[in-house]
Amino acid sequence: MKLNQLIISPNVRKWYSRLLLLLVFFFVCYYIFLNFSEIRRFKYDLEWIYLFYSILSFLISYLLQIFIWYHLASSFGLKASFLPTAKCWSLSQLGKYLPGKVGLFLVRMDLYSNVSKRVVAFATGVEFITSMTAAFIIVLFSIAFLPKTIPAYIRTTAISFVIFFLLILYPPILKKISAIIFKLIYKEPLTELPTYGLLIKFVLANIIIGLPYGLGIYCAFNCFHHIGWNLFLTLTGVYYAASLIGVAAFFAPAGIGVREGFALLILPAFMAQPVVIFGTILTRFLITFVEIILAALFPMVEFFSKCRKCNL
């Protein structure tokens, strides 16, 4: 068997992904093991009020993301009332937990079964680009307020990606890219796209989401040990950077392990290691908990809404 055939083999890709995910989890577990004695000595009292604030903040950030998708989908002609749209978005988020990140696309295509799949896929791609652009801007902003000096290449890289994504969103460029993609899959290209001004508004809306999302992370860490507001932007920036790495790590479902590993690598420079370990584990749990709650809530509301209409 030739080397290039071996590399593109689905079997090889599957085991390669599993190996990478295993290595990430090994690093996280090994880090916790090395600091186990310090964790055991660490004294904390769980602050339930911060736990409540954290869940509430994550809920707000996800609800705002649903509103963004509702308006973005409408701009691509995916017309639907808010409740079915919210159900579609929340269920599709669980698709991230399938390896390879394709689950999100597949769930949305299934839920928008009466609409062209290429439109759904392209709208989802634009949503991804606008959120990634916002993430890089948030990381850039947080870098400016970091308590310690960081290498200049990190700031340069973030700026480069912001410019890159903003260029991709420019309609003439976006139309050319979409035409190439649809030509490769033997589909007709989209003729109408949202205006550049509207796409920039979606980027700005995603930046605003960083406030409740960052507050959720900040409150999660405060559940175990009080940390100052001066670390709010640091925590937010680190987690957004970790999310970007998690997206790039296609082998990790929803970036599990990768985000935590990045946080464990960076945050000990700013706070005690036990706080970092407890905080990262709790943050992952709360984010997943909120995603499951929303994915269960909207289908239930829609079901009872239909039952009520039938009884009238």
Image: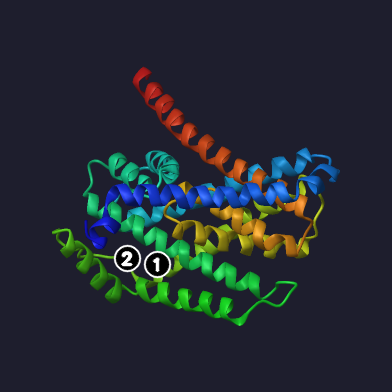
The residue depicted at 40 percent of the width and 52 percent of the height is 16
Residue 156 versus residue 304 in the image, above or below = below
Query: Residue 41 at x, y = what percent?
Result: 85, 44
Tag of residue 114 = none
Q: Is residue 80 visible?
A: no
- The C terminus is located in which quarter? top left
Query: Residue 278 at x, y = what percent?
Result: 72, 46
Left or right: 81 in relation to 163: left
Q: Residues within 10 Å of mark 1 (few under 14, many from 20)?
A: many
The residue depicted at 23 percent of the width and 54 percent of the height is 118
| Quarter of the rendering containing residue 77 | bottom left
Type of amino acid under label 1: Leu
For the view shown, which residue lies furthest in the front direction? 1
For the view shown, which residue lies furthest in the top direction? 311
| Quarter of the rendering containing residue 263 | bottom right
Mark count: 2
User: Mark 2 sits on what residue?
Assistant: 194
User: Mark 1 sits on what residue?
Assistant: 199
CB atoms of marks 1 and 2 within 8 Å: yes
- Per the image, label 2 sits on a secondary structure element best described as loop
User: Looking at the image, which is closer to me, 195 or 90?
Assistant: 90
User: Looking at the image, which is closer to me, 10 or 1?
Assistant: 1
Q: Residues within 10 Å of mark 2 (few under 14, many from 20)?
A: some
The Cα–Cα distance between marks 1 and 2, rounded to whole angstroms, is 7 Å
Scheme by which the image is coloured: rainbow
